[in-house]
Image (cartoon, rainbow, N blue to C red):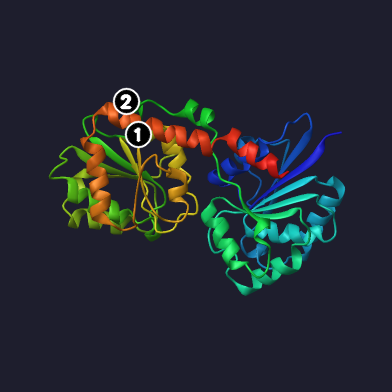
Amino acid sequence: MRKNILIFCHHYATQFIDVCNQYTDLFDRKQYHVTVAYLRGVPDARAKARTNADEVIFLSQSEKETRGLKLGLFWRLLRFCRERRFAIVVCHRYKPLYLMLWVAWCVRIPLLFGVMHDLHAFTSLRRRLLVKCLVQTQSQYLAGVSNAVRDDMRASLRHWLPSARIITLYNCIDMPALERVLVSRHEALAALGLPPDRFVFGTLGRLEQVKDQGTMLRALARILPACPQAMLVIAGIGSEEQALKTLAGELGIADRVCFTGFVPEVWRYLRAFDVFLLTSLREAFGRVLPEAMTACVPVIGVTTDGIPEVIGSAGKVLSPGDVPAIAEAMAFFYRLTPEERNAWGRRGYGQIEQHFSLPRFRETFWGLA
Protein backbone atom coordinates (compact mmCIF):
# COMPACT_ATOMS: atom_id res chain seq x y z
CA MET A 1 0.00 0.00 0.00
CA ARG A 2 1.30 3.45 -0.91
CA LYS A 3 2.04 5.95 1.85
CA ASN A 4 -0.03 9.13 1.84
CA ILE A 5 1.67 12.51 1.41
CA LEU A 6 0.03 15.92 1.83
CA ILE A 7 1.34 19.15 0.32
CA PHE A 8 -0.74 21.96 1.82
CA CYS A 9 -0.45 25.27 -0.05
CA HIS A 10 -1.79 28.74 0.53
CA HIS A 11 -3.06 29.35 -3.02
CA TYR A 12 -2.69 28.13 -6.60
CA ALA A 13 -1.18 31.25 -8.17
CA THR A 14 1.43 30.26 -10.75
CA GLN A 15 4.44 30.75 -8.48
CA PHE A 16 2.81 28.64 -5.75
CA ILE A 17 2.04 25.80 -8.15
CA ASP A 18 5.68 25.78 -9.26
CA VAL A 19 6.87 25.48 -5.67
CA CYS A 20 4.20 22.88 -4.92
CA ASN A 21 5.39 20.75 -7.84
CA GLN A 22 8.94 20.99 -6.54
CA TYR A 23 7.73 18.98 -3.55
CA THR A 24 5.30 16.63 -5.27
CA ASP A 25 8.08 15.54 -7.61
CA LEU A 26 10.05 14.24 -4.64
CA PHE A 27 7.84 11.21 -4.31
CA ASP A 28 7.89 8.02 -6.39
CA ARG A 29 4.24 7.38 -7.22
CA LYS A 30 4.77 3.63 -6.93
CA GLN A 31 5.43 4.14 -3.23
CA TYR A 32 3.49 7.32 -2.41
CA HIS A 33 0.04 8.77 -3.05
CA VAL A 34 0.45 12.56 -3.19
CA THR A 35 -2.40 14.91 -2.34
CA VAL A 36 -2.20 18.67 -2.81
CA ALA A 37 -4.62 20.89 -0.90
CA TYR A 38 -5.06 24.57 -1.76
CA LEU A 39 -6.36 26.59 1.16
CA ARG A 40 -7.60 29.60 -0.82
CA GLY A 41 -9.26 29.77 -4.21
CA VAL A 42 -12.28 28.10 -5.76
CA PRO A 43 -11.89 24.89 -7.80
CA ASP A 44 -9.95 25.64 -10.96
CA ALA A 45 -9.46 23.14 -13.78
CA ARG A 46 -6.27 24.78 -15.07
CA ALA A 47 -4.66 24.84 -11.63
CA LYS A 48 -5.58 21.20 -11.13
CA ALA A 49 -4.09 20.24 -14.49
CA ARG A 50 -0.84 22.07 -13.71
CA THR A 51 -0.45 20.48 -10.29
CA ASN A 52 1.60 17.27 -10.42
CA ALA A 53 -0.31 15.23 -7.86
CA ASP A 54 -2.49 12.15 -7.62
CA GLU A 55 -5.25 14.24 -6.07
CA VAL A 56 -5.96 17.98 -5.83
CA ILE A 57 -8.33 19.41 -3.24
CA PHE A 58 -9.63 22.99 -3.19
CA LEU A 59 -10.68 24.13 0.27
CA SER A 60 -12.16 27.32 -1.26
CA GLN A 61 -11.43 29.61 1.68
CA SER A 62 -11.47 33.36 1.20
CA GLU A 63 -8.87 35.59 2.86
CA LYS A 64 -11.43 36.60 5.47
CA GLU A 65 -12.37 32.99 6.17
CA THR A 66 -8.76 32.03 6.92
CA ARG A 67 -8.30 34.59 9.70
CA GLY A 68 -8.02 33.04 13.12
CA LEU A 69 -8.74 29.41 13.89
CA LYS A 70 -11.89 28.50 12.01
CA LEU A 71 -13.38 25.49 13.77
CA GLY A 72 -15.30 24.28 10.73
CA LEU A 73 -12.14 24.18 8.63
CA PHE A 74 -10.18 22.63 11.50
CA TRP A 75 -12.68 19.77 11.90
CA ARG A 76 -12.70 19.21 8.16
CA LEU A 77 -8.90 18.92 8.09
CA LEU A 78 -8.88 16.74 11.20
CA ARG A 79 -11.32 14.23 9.69
CA PHE A 80 -9.35 14.22 6.46
CA CYS A 81 -6.03 13.56 8.21
CA ARG A 82 -7.53 10.82 10.37
CA GLU A 83 -8.80 9.07 7.25
CA ARG A 84 -5.56 9.38 5.28
CA ARG A 85 -2.92 9.01 8.02
CA PHE A 86 -0.35 11.06 6.16
CA ALA A 87 3.27 9.97 6.52
CA ILE A 88 4.64 13.38 5.54
CA VAL A 89 2.94 16.79 5.46
CA VAL A 90 4.55 19.85 3.90
CA CYS A 91 2.84 23.19 4.58
CA HIS A 92 3.68 26.30 2.56
CA ARG A 93 3.34 29.64 4.36
CA TYR A 94 2.10 30.34 7.84
CA LYS A 95 -1.66 29.73 7.73
CA PRO A 96 -1.49 26.12 6.40
CA LEU A 97 1.21 25.38 8.99
CA TYR A 98 -0.84 26.94 11.77
CA LEU A 99 -3.85 24.77 10.90
CA MET A 100 -1.81 21.57 10.61
CA LEU A 101 -0.03 22.15 13.91
CA TRP A 102 -3.45 22.14 15.58
CA VAL A 103 -4.40 18.98 13.68
CA ALA A 104 -1.12 17.35 14.74
CA TRP A 105 -2.21 17.59 18.36
CA CYS A 106 -5.02 15.17 17.54
CA VAL A 107 -3.56 13.02 14.75
CA ARG A 108 -0.03 11.68 14.60
CA ILE A 109 1.95 13.10 11.66
CA PRO A 110 5.34 11.36 11.53
CA LEU A 111 7.07 14.21 9.65
CA LEU A 112 5.80 17.79 9.31
CA PHE A 113 7.48 20.72 7.55
CA GLY A 114 6.35 24.32 7.62
CA VAL A 115 8.03 26.17 4.74
CA MET A 116 8.17 29.95 5.02
CA HIS A 117 8.58 31.97 1.83
CA ASP A 118 9.14 35.43 3.28
CA LEU A 119 10.97 37.15 6.09
CA HIS A 120 9.48 38.24 9.40
CA ALA A 121 7.00 35.36 9.58
CA PHE A 122 7.46 35.03 13.35
CA THR A 123 8.13 38.54 14.57
CA SER A 124 4.78 38.82 16.36
CA LEU A 125 4.57 37.61 19.94
CA ARG A 126 1.34 35.76 19.17
CA ARG A 127 2.97 33.62 16.52
CA ARG A 128 6.01 32.91 18.69
CA LEU A 129 3.76 31.76 21.50
CA LEU A 130 1.84 29.51 19.12
CA VAL A 131 5.08 27.91 17.92
CA LYS A 132 6.18 27.34 21.50
CA CYS A 133 2.86 25.71 22.37
CA LEU A 134 2.13 23.77 19.18
CA VAL A 135 5.48 22.51 17.86
CA GLN A 136 5.72 19.31 19.85
CA THR A 137 8.11 16.72 18.48
CA GLN A 138 11.56 16.35 16.94
CA SER A 139 9.91 15.48 13.63
CA GLN A 140 8.36 18.93 13.15
CA TYR A 141 10.49 21.47 11.32
CA LEU A 142 10.30 25.06 10.23
CA ALA A 143 12.10 25.66 6.93
CA GLY A 144 13.11 28.82 5.13
CA VAL A 145 13.42 29.02 1.35
CA SER A 146 16.85 30.59 1.86
CA ASN A 147 19.40 30.87 4.64
CA ALA A 148 18.27 34.47 5.02
CA VAL A 149 14.72 33.33 5.87
CA ARG A 150 16.06 30.55 8.10
CA ASP A 151 18.28 32.96 10.01
CA ASP A 152 15.44 35.46 10.36
CA MET A 153 13.25 32.73 11.91
CA ARG A 154 16.06 31.58 14.19
CA ALA A 155 16.49 35.15 15.42
CA SER A 156 12.75 35.56 16.05
CA LEU A 157 12.42 32.16 17.77
CA ARG A 158 15.79 31.94 19.55
CA HIS A 159 14.12 31.64 22.96
CA TRP A 160 11.20 29.55 21.68
CA LEU A 161 12.50 26.76 19.45
CA PRO A 162 15.91 25.02 19.09
CA SER A 163 17.79 26.31 16.05
CA ALA A 164 18.32 22.73 14.82
CA ARG A 165 14.58 22.56 14.15
CA ILE A 166 14.76 25.58 11.84
CA ILE A 167 16.38 24.62 8.55
CA THR A 168 16.76 25.67 4.91
CA LEU A 169 14.86 24.02 2.08
CA TYR A 170 15.77 26.10 -0.93
CA ASN A 171 13.38 26.88 -3.70
CA CYS A 172 14.73 25.14 -6.76
CA ILE A 173 14.28 25.03 -10.51
CA ASP A 174 13.31 22.13 -12.73
CA MET A 175 16.04 23.10 -15.17
CA PRO A 176 15.19 20.65 -17.99
CA ALA A 177 11.51 21.65 -17.85
CA LEU A 178 12.35 25.36 -18.02
CA GLU A 179 14.85 24.85 -20.83
CA ARG A 180 12.19 23.05 -22.88
CA VAL A 181 9.92 26.12 -22.89
CA LEU A 182 12.56 28.83 -23.31
CA VAL A 183 12.42 30.31 -26.79
CA SER A 184 15.36 31.57 -28.82
CA ARG A 185 16.62 35.13 -28.50
CA HIS A 186 15.18 36.02 -31.90
CA GLU A 187 11.74 34.66 -30.97
CA ALA A 188 11.87 36.29 -27.54
CA LEU A 189 12.72 39.71 -28.94
CA ALA A 190 9.87 39.40 -31.43
CA ALA A 191 7.39 38.28 -28.76
CA LEU A 192 8.24 41.27 -26.55
CA GLY A 193 8.29 43.70 -29.48
CA LEU A 194 11.95 44.63 -28.97
CA PRO A 195 14.39 45.84 -31.62
CA PRO A 196 17.10 43.34 -32.57
CA ASP A 197 19.99 45.81 -32.42
CA ARG A 198 19.78 46.89 -28.76
CA PHE A 199 21.71 45.67 -25.74
CA VAL A 200 18.87 44.61 -23.47
CA PHE A 201 18.97 44.82 -19.69
CA GLY A 202 15.82 43.21 -18.30
CA THR A 203 13.89 42.40 -15.18
CA LEU A 204 10.69 40.53 -14.28
CA GLY A 205 8.45 41.09 -11.28
CA ARG A 206 5.82 43.20 -9.58
CA LEU A 207 6.15 46.94 -10.04
CA GLU A 208 6.21 47.84 -6.34
CA GLN A 209 8.45 50.05 -4.21
CA VAL A 210 10.08 47.03 -2.58
CA LYS A 211 11.35 45.88 -6.00
CA ASP A 212 13.12 49.23 -6.50
CA GLN A 213 13.07 49.33 -10.29
CA GLY A 214 13.77 53.05 -9.93
CA THR A 215 17.41 52.22 -9.19
CA MET A 216 17.63 50.42 -12.54
CA LEU A 217 16.26 53.47 -14.35
CA ARG A 218 18.76 55.80 -12.67
CA ALA A 219 21.62 53.41 -13.45
CA LEU A 220 20.55 53.18 -17.09
CA ALA A 221 20.47 56.97 -17.40
CA ARG A 222 24.00 57.05 -15.98
CA ILE A 223 25.50 54.63 -18.53
CA LEU A 224 23.71 55.68 -21.72
CA PRO A 225 26.33 58.23 -22.85
CA ALA A 226 28.98 55.47 -22.84
CA CYS A 227 26.61 52.60 -23.76
CA PRO A 228 24.46 54.07 -26.55
CA GLN A 229 22.78 50.80 -27.56
CA ALA A 230 21.55 49.97 -24.06
CA MET A 231 17.88 49.71 -23.15
CA LEU A 232 15.89 48.40 -20.17
CA VAL A 233 12.88 46.09 -20.26
CA ILE A 234 10.65 46.03 -17.17
CA ALA A 235 8.14 43.18 -17.39
CA GLY A 236 5.27 43.14 -14.92
CA ILE A 237 2.47 45.20 -13.44
CA GLY A 238 1.95 46.93 -10.13
CA SER A 239 1.13 50.09 -8.24
CA GLU A 240 4.41 51.81 -9.16
CA GLU A 241 3.99 51.55 -12.93
CA GLN A 242 3.00 55.16 -13.53
CA ALA A 243 5.60 56.50 -11.09
CA LEU A 244 8.32 54.54 -12.88
CA LYS A 245 7.18 55.78 -16.28
CA THR A 246 7.22 59.35 -14.93
CA LEU A 247 10.75 58.82 -13.57
CA ALA A 248 11.93 57.50 -16.93
CA GLY A 249 10.57 60.65 -18.56
CA GLU A 250 12.23 62.91 -15.99
CA LEU A 251 15.56 61.14 -16.57
CA GLY A 252 15.18 61.59 -20.34
CA ILE A 253 15.32 57.86 -21.05
CA ALA A 254 11.67 57.06 -21.80
CA ASP A 255 12.60 55.97 -25.32
CA ARG A 256 15.10 53.46 -23.87
CA VAL A 257 12.71 51.79 -21.45
CA CYS A 258 10.07 49.23 -22.41
CA PHE A 259 7.27 48.53 -19.94
CA THR A 260 5.73 45.31 -21.23
CA GLY A 261 2.86 45.08 -18.74
CA PHE A 262 1.62 41.60 -17.92
CA VAL A 263 3.01 38.96 -20.26
CA PRO A 264 1.72 35.37 -19.81
CA GLU A 265 4.56 32.91 -19.11
CA VAL A 266 7.05 35.75 -19.45
CA TRP A 267 9.93 33.55 -18.26
CA ARG A 268 9.83 31.87 -21.68
CA TYR A 269 11.37 35.04 -23.12
CA LEU A 270 14.34 35.43 -20.77
CA ARG A 271 16.80 34.96 -23.62
CA ALA A 272 15.71 38.33 -24.97
CA PHE A 273 17.89 39.83 -22.22
CA ASP A 274 21.64 40.31 -22.46
CA VAL A 275 21.77 40.90 -18.68
CA PHE A 276 19.17 40.33 -15.96
CA LEU A 277 18.75 42.80 -13.07
CA LEU A 278 17.22 42.34 -9.61
CA THR A 279 17.54 45.29 -7.22
CA SER A 280 14.90 44.48 -4.59
CA LEU A 281 14.96 45.99 -1.12
CA ARG A 282 13.49 42.75 0.28
CA GLU A 283 13.73 39.36 -1.40
CA ALA A 284 13.49 36.10 0.51
CA PHE A 285 14.86 34.09 -2.40
CA GLY A 286 14.30 35.75 -5.78
CA ARG A 287 12.98 32.91 -7.93
CA VAL A 288 13.45 34.92 -11.12
CA LEU A 289 17.21 34.76 -10.60
CA PRO A 290 17.63 30.98 -11.03
CA GLU A 291 15.22 31.17 -13.96
CA ALA A 292 17.41 33.79 -15.66
CA MET A 293 20.58 31.87 -14.78
CA THR A 294 19.11 28.66 -16.22
CA ALA A 295 18.60 30.64 -19.43
CA CYS A 296 22.36 31.43 -19.28
CA VAL A 297 21.70 35.16 -18.87
CA PRO A 298 24.35 37.00 -16.77
CA VAL A 299 22.87 38.54 -13.63
CA ILE A 300 23.30 41.65 -11.51
CA GLY A 301 21.76 41.59 -8.04
CA VAL A 302 22.03 43.25 -4.65
CA THR A 303 23.03 42.13 -1.17
CA THR A 304 19.41 41.86 -0.05
CA ASP A 305 18.35 38.82 2.00
CA GLY A 306 18.50 35.66 -0.16
CA ILE A 307 19.78 37.22 -3.40
CA PRO A 308 23.53 36.74 -2.70
CA GLU A 309 22.94 33.06 -1.87
CA VAL A 310 21.41 32.45 -5.28
CA ILE A 311 23.97 34.36 -7.32
CA GLY A 312 27.07 33.30 -5.38
CA SER A 313 30.16 34.26 -7.39
CA ALA A 314 28.37 33.71 -10.71
CA GLY A 315 27.24 37.33 -11.16
CA LYS A 316 27.66 40.85 -9.84
CA VAL A 317 26.22 41.59 -6.37
CA LEU A 318 26.11 45.22 -5.18
CA SER A 319 24.58 47.19 -2.32
CA PRO A 320 20.84 47.95 -2.65
CA GLY A 321 20.17 51.39 -4.09
CA ASP A 322 23.82 51.99 -5.00
CA VAL A 323 23.19 53.57 -8.40
CA PRO A 324 26.86 54.25 -9.30
CA ALA A 325 27.94 50.67 -8.49
CA ILE A 326 24.99 49.10 -10.32
CA ALA A 327 25.62 51.37 -13.30
CA GLU A 328 29.28 50.32 -13.31
CA ALA A 329 28.26 46.63 -13.31
CA MET A 330 25.85 47.26 -16.19
CA ALA A 331 28.59 49.00 -18.18
CA PHE A 332 30.98 46.14 -17.38
CA PHE A 333 28.69 43.60 -19.05
CA TYR A 334 27.94 45.98 -21.92
CA ARG A 335 31.64 46.22 -22.77
CA LEU A 336 32.26 42.46 -22.76
CA THR A 337 32.44 40.49 -25.97
CA PRO A 338 29.56 38.07 -26.65
CA GLU A 339 31.89 35.19 -25.80
CA GLU A 340 32.81 36.75 -22.46
CA ARG A 341 29.14 37.34 -21.59
CA ASN A 342 28.34 33.76 -22.56
CA ALA A 343 31.02 32.59 -20.13
CA TRP A 344 29.29 34.52 -17.32
CA GLY A 345 26.00 32.97 -18.39
CA ARG A 346 27.44 29.46 -18.26
CA ARG A 347 28.86 30.21 -14.82
CA GLY A 348 25.39 31.14 -13.64
CA TYR A 349 23.95 27.97 -15.14
CA GLY A 350 26.52 25.91 -13.22
CA GLN A 351 25.64 27.72 -9.98
CA ILE A 352 21.98 26.76 -10.32
CA GLU A 353 22.76 23.21 -11.39
CA GLN A 354 25.00 22.71 -8.37
CA HIS A 355 22.88 24.34 -5.67
CA PHE A 356 19.28 24.94 -6.83
CA SER A 357 18.37 22.08 -9.17
CA LEU A 358 15.81 19.37 -8.45
CA PRO A 359 18.46 16.63 -7.93
CA ARG A 360 20.21 18.81 -5.35
CA PHE A 361 16.92 19.52 -3.59
CA ARG A 362 16.07 15.81 -3.47
CA GLU A 363 19.38 15.08 -1.77
CA THR A 364 18.71 17.74 0.86
CA PHE A 365 15.11 16.72 1.55
CA TRP A 366 15.67 12.99 1.79
CA GLY A 367 18.69 13.63 3.99
CA LEU A 368 16.20 15.02 6.51
CA ALA A 369 13.36 12.56 5.94
Q: Residue 217 or 189: which is nearer the viewer?
A: 217
- Which residue is more in the foreground, 353 or 239? 353
Say how many tags the image has: 2
Using a 10 Å C-alpha cutoff, classify the residue at mark 2 as few (fewer than 14 neighbours), some (14 to 19) or many (20 or more).
Answer: some
Q: Residues within 10 Å of mark 1 (few under 14, many from 20)?
A: many
* Callout 1: SS: helix
Residue bearing the label numbered 2: 186
Residue 78 image offset from top left, x and y in percent: 82, 56
147 displayed left or right of 304: right
Distance, label 1 to label 2, CA atoms, is 20 Å
Please state which of residues 302 and 28 is positioned toward the viewer in this rendering: 302
Could you tell me the amino acid type at mark 2? His
Q: Which residue is drawn at the image coordinates 67% and 56% (left, top)? A: 164
Residue 292 percent coordinates (x, y): 41, 37
Quarter-of-image position of residue 93: bottom right
Residue visible at 27% across and 45% down?
Answer: 329
Q: Give the vertical position of 203 relative to 337 (above or below).
A: below
* Residue underneath mark 1: 344
The answer to which quarter of the image holds residue 76 is bottom right
Looking at the image, which residue is at 83% across and 34% down? 2
Residue 331's label in the rendered image is: none
Asked whether residue 291 is in view, the answer is yes
Q: Secondary structure at mark 2?
A: helix
Q: In the image, residue 204 lies at what x, y percent?
A: 39, 45
- Residue 99's spot in the image, x, y percent? 73, 60
Q: Residue at x 18, y 47 (%)?
A: 223
Q: Is residue 167 above or below residue 32?
A: below
